[in-house]
Image: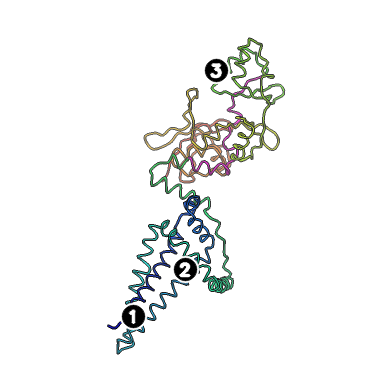
Amino acid sequence: MDLYTISIILFIFFLILLSGFFSGTETALTAVSKPKIHQLEKRNPRAKIVSFLKLQKEKLIGTLLLGNNLVNTLATAIATSLIINYSNDNEKAVIYSTCIMTALILIFGEVLPKTIAINKAEKFSLLFAPTIKILVKILSPFTYLIHFFTRGILKLFKFQITSDIGTSEDELRGAIDLHAKSEGSTQEKDMLKGILDLDDLQVNEIMTHRKNLEVIYDNDPERKNIKKILNSQFTRLPLYNKNSDKILGILNVKDVLKNLNKKKKSDLKLIAKDPWFIPETTSVLDQLQEFKKRQRHLAFVVDEYGTLMGIITLEDIIEEIVGDIDDEHDIKIKGARKSKDGKYTISGKVTIRDMNREFGWSLPDNNASTLAGLIFYEIKAIPEPGKIFSFYGFRFEIIKARKNHIDLVKVTPLN
C-alpha cells in the first residue's frame, strides 16, 4: 500500500471524525438545558455563546446539517473511488463502499458521538460552542439559501411555522412531575405547582365563604363581644352591624387587648381598622402582591353588585402554596375521612384542590371550587339524600343534604 493510498484512507477517517463532531455538537446543543446554561452565563463566557446559538436555532441546525452531510458525502465518494481503483468489478466496489462507509459513519459519525454528547451535553456544548459560532458565520450564505427554499416549500403546503418561545408552563409542570416521581416526594411538587397556580386562581375559589365567617356584632353587649374575641381562634375579626347589614371594619385582637389593658371602655368602631373590599375575580397572585404592598392580612371579597361573598387572608394564599397550616390554636375539622373499604366520606364544603392534593385525584376545578359546587354543576339540580351520581371516574352518594346545601357525600373511586 503506497503513501497516497494511506493518505486517502487517513483523510476518509478524518472526514468521519468531522461527521461525528457535527452530529455530537447538534445533539449536545439541542439537549443542553436552557435554565442551566442561563445560570452558567454568570461565570462562564462560553455559556453566553451556547445561549446565542440556541436562539439562532434555524441557522445552527442548518450549519450543522450542511457540514455533516458535506463530509459524509465527500467521505463516501472518496472511499468509493478508492475501492474502484483496487477492484475489477465496479458494481461490487460500489456495494463494498456503501456497506463499509455506512458502518463507519453510523458507528463513529452518529451513534458514538451522539451517545457521548447526550450524556455530557453541557460539557460538549461549552467545549465546541466557539467553533460552531465561527462556522455559523462562515456558512450563513448557504444556510440562508437552504432556509429560503425550505420555507418556500413549507408555504406551498401551507405549513405554519411557529417561533421558539422557550420553556412553556406545561413543560415546567411536566418537569416538576418528573422530579417528584424520581425523588418519590410530592411535597415539593405541590408547593411548586401551587406557585404556578396562583395566577390562574381567583380569590373566590379559596376564600372563606360568608356563611362560615366568625364576626363581631357592633350591636351586641360589650361583655359578650370581648368574651367572643378572647375565645376566638383568629387574630383578626370582621366588625358587623346588623341594622345596616354592612361591614364596619376589622378588629385586631391586639388592639382590643391594648384597649382593655388601659382599662378603657371599648368602642369597637373606633378600634376597628377600615375594611378593604376586593372583587371576587381578582387573581390570587395579584392579591398576594397587594397584601405585601399594603401590609394587610385580610380583605373582604365582594361580587359585581357589591354583595359580600367572604373573606380572604394572607394565610389562605400561603396555604395554597405550602398546604394547610395548623397552629396550636387552630380547630382542626376533619372534612374528609377514608374508610377501610376505600370509600371517602367528605364534607360538601371541602375544596376540590384540597381533595386532589390529599388523595392524588384529578377532579376539575375550573367550574366549581368545592365538592358540593362540582355536584351542583354536573347534575344541574339540588339532590336529595340517597341519590347517586357517577362522573369523572367517581361515584358520588349524597349522605346528608338540607335546603340548598350538600353537607356530606360518600365518594368512591371507580378505577
Pointer 1 or 3: first along the chain: 1
Q: Quadrant of the N terminus?
A: bottom left
Task: Determine whether label 3 and label 2 are within 8 Å by CB.
Answer: no
Which range is magenta?
191-217
The quarter holding residue 358 reads top left
Which three-letter amino acid code belongs to the residue tagged 2? Leu
Compared with 167, 157 (above or below) is: below
Pointer 1 or 2: first along the chain: 2
Pointer 3 or 2: first along the chain: 2
Q: In the picture provided, is 98 more to the left or to the right than 193?
A: left
Residue carrying label 2: 64
| C-alpha span from label 1 to label 2 | 24 Å
Q: Residues within 10 Å of mark 2 (few under 14, many from 20)?
A: many
Q: Residues within 10 Å of mark 1 (few under 14, many from 20)?
A: many
| C-alpha span from label 1 to label 3 | 91 Å
* Labelled disc at residue 231: 3
